[in-house]
Amino acid sequence: MRTGRSPIGFLGTGIMGSPMARRLVEAGYEVHVWNRTREKADRLGAVVVATPADAVRHADVVICMLSSGPVCDEVLLGDGGALAEMAEGSTLVVMSSIPVHTAHTHASAAAARNVRYLDAPVSGGEKGAADGTLAILVGGEEAVLERVRPVLETMGRPTHIGPAGTGQLAKLVNQLIVAGTITVVAEALLLAERGGADPARVREGMLGGFARSTVLEQHGARMITQDFRPGGPAKHQLKDTETAMALARGLGLALPVSALVNSLFADLVEHGDGQLDHSAVIRELRRHNRLPLS
């Protein structure tokens, strides 16, 4: 960064963006935030602005945490897009989960404006965002990462993966692992329940062995208590697994397990549960087995 006190522009204060922006504010940064629904940004202690252009115009670092590739394209590259208002030499960090080819498009558009670019999607959910423990998967030039490392370290642990687009590729890999693990945990807990064991006691016992994982610990508990308030909405999980499957097809890869997991999340969303946490995939397994949902 040019100075430690330059404003940070922040685009998107949803489930993940809000705690991320709040951590920056609490770390002493001046943060200019924009969100389509202003009320979601008003409680952060940041400077809330009316347009994306207002958020980025004086910023040395701009963080984009919007919901999808098309939304990022609209806000960054559309008519009156934010990128056109960014100062030369500033840095755009897209932390949204977007397709690899979209990251390449953003990187090229940023370079044409003499703006530095990183794709830096995150993993760790709402809790990780609030605690500042997100895994941050960074694509782009390593020297650019070093310039903004203090900003990113306020939110989590950045790891340089490779050139622009590889951060998004790593996130897709992450999402396949997460989606598959959530689904297997759901199947296992359902088997425990139907077999006559207390799923809560089974989960407790497994936390001491090789099956222990963040998914079992956090999402297993959600499944048992049926607390499906969204930390990571199922519709966003499906967006990412669909993107990963499209990339695999383009590479000529068959990923049969991931394809089945993706179809379960597609069914979950089709049945109206897209706004629920992705741990709600256990509801889809109940449907498949003609079992009560609660």
Image (tube, grey):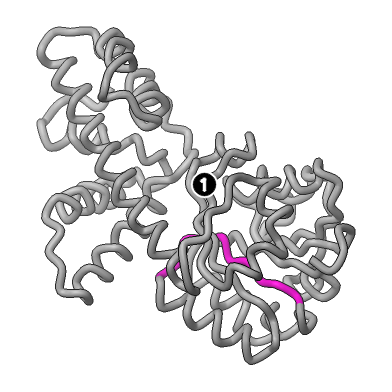
Q: Which residue is mark 1?
A: 135
Residue 82 position (above or below residue 278): below
44 left or right, relative to 126: right
- Write the start and end of the magenta stretch as one range: 90-99
125 left or right, relative to 116: left
118 left or right, relative to 285: right
Locate residue 164, reporting x and y percent.
49, 74
Give the residue displayed 66% in from the left and 71% down from the top: 92
Q: Amino acid at mark 1?
A: Ala
Does the segment drawn in magenta span residue 136? no
Locate residue 269, reporting x and y percent.
31, 50
Give the residue displayed 60% in from the left and 41% down from the top: 129
Give the residue displayed 84% in from the left and 69% down from the top: 2
Question: Is most of the magenta stretch helix, strand or loop?
Answer: loop
- Quadrant where the N terminus lies? bottom right
Q: Residue furthest bottom?
A: 112
